[in-house]
Image: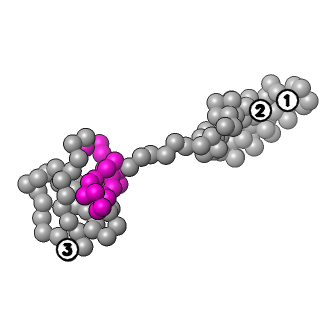
Amino acid sequence: MKALVHADSGTVTDIVADDATFDVHSDYVWKDMISDYVEGTDQPPDYSYDDSTDTITRKETPTETYDVKRRWAYNIVTEQLDQLWHDIDDGKFGADAKTGVWYNGVKSTKDAYPKT
């Protein structure tokens, strides 16, 4: 496999079979792709090229922090407000509020992704 690389930025823009390369602008070069490339799954943005070592490497995916995980796990605000309204309408105040849908939904997310 060959990777089409932007020479200045090291951005991998395309990955093709060895016999499928084509003429490109002088800003781009074809480089041998690394052996762990998985055709049909991996995409060019998954890789970068290092000119100083003349190698293509797989980019490391950063681990999401707890606050990002929570942001994606919480229900949308309109749903949370509806849950909160129903809890209040059901008379869930004080200690009883901890049995409500809204409280338990938020608590389950906070428990699943604690502050680190």
| Quarter of image, res 23 | bottom left
Residue underneath mark 3: 25
Q: Where is residue 33 in the image (x, y as percent from the top left)?
A: 21, 50
Residue underneath mark 1: 97
**If you read the primary sequence from the N terminus, does the residue marked by circle 1 or circle 2 appear first?**
1
Residue underneath mark 2: 103
Give the tally of numbered discs: 3
Q: What residue type is labelled 3?
A: His
Q: What stretch is highlighted in magenta?
A: 37-58
Q: Of the numbered discs in the image, which one, if any, rests on residue 31?
A: none
Mark 1 touches mark 2? (CB < 8 Å): yes
Residue 114 against residue 59 in the figure, above or below: above
Residue 5 against residue 44 in the figure, above or below: below
Helix, strand or loop status at disc 2: helix
Is 91 magenta? The answer is: no
Q: Which residue is drawn at 80% across and 39% down?
A: 85
Q: What residue type is labelled 2?
A: Tyr
